[in-house]
Amino acid sequence: MGIEGNIQDIAAGLAIGLGSFGPAIGIGMLAAKAMESLGRNPEAAGPIQTNMILAIAFTEAIAIYALVVAVIIKFV
């Protein structure tokens, strides 16, 4: 396998590691702001929760793209 395999392993690890860092920060910020909004306006729980879940799904898609790139780097 040689040096090429080691470089691919490092590249795949960096792709998923750095690619999941941004979405993790984004989801944390989304949840924090949603909890803050609920504390200020509890009557708006339904729309806030719906929009938060939708935003988290879009943010999580970025991490899935990073996983796909890491798998492609590793096995192609």
Image (cartoon, rainbow, N blue to C red):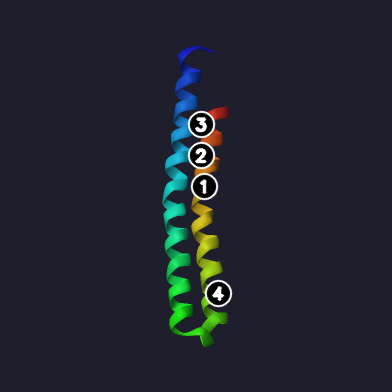
Pinpoint residue 75: horizontal percent, then vertical percent. Answer: 58, 28
Nearer mark to the viewer, of 3 and 4 = 4
Q: What element carries label 2?
A: helix
Q: Residues within 10 Å of mark 1 (few under 14, many from 20)?
A: some
Query: Which residue is painted at 56% across and 74% down in the image?
Result: 50
Q: What element carries label 3?
A: helix
Q: Residue 69 carries which label?
A: 2
Query: Which residue is painted at 54% across and 13% down in the image?
Result: 1
Residue 45 in view here = yes
Disc 2 and disc 4: Cα gap in Å?
A: 31 Å
Q: Nearer the viewer, residue 76 or 51?
A: 51
Q: Is mark 1 on a helix, strand or loop?
A: helix
Pinpoint residue 57: horizontal percent, then vertical percent. Answer: 55, 61
**Dots 2 and 3: beta carbons under 8 Å?**
yes
**Dots 1 and 4: beta carbons under 8 Å?**
no
The residue carrying mark 1 is 65
- Tell which residue pokes out farthest to the front in this image: 39
Residue type, mark 4 in image:
Gln
Residue type, mark 2 in image:
Val
The residue carrying mark 4 is 49
In the image, taking residue 37 as reference, residue 57 lies left or right, namely right
Disc 3 and disc 4: Cα gap in Å?
A: 36 Å
Disc 1 and disc 4: Cα gap in Å?
A: 25 Å
**Dots 2 and 1: beta carbons under 8 Å?**
yes
Q: Which mark is residue 73?
A: 3
Disc 2 and disc 1: Cα gap in Å?
A: 6 Å
Pinpoint residue 68: horizontal percent, then vertical percent. Answer: 55, 41
**Dots 3 and 4: beta carbons under 8 Å?**
no
Pinpoint residue 70: horizontal percent, then vertical percent. Answer: 52, 36
- Tell which residue pokes out farthest to the bottom in this image: 43
Query: Which residue is painted at 45% across and 30% down in the image?
Result: 11
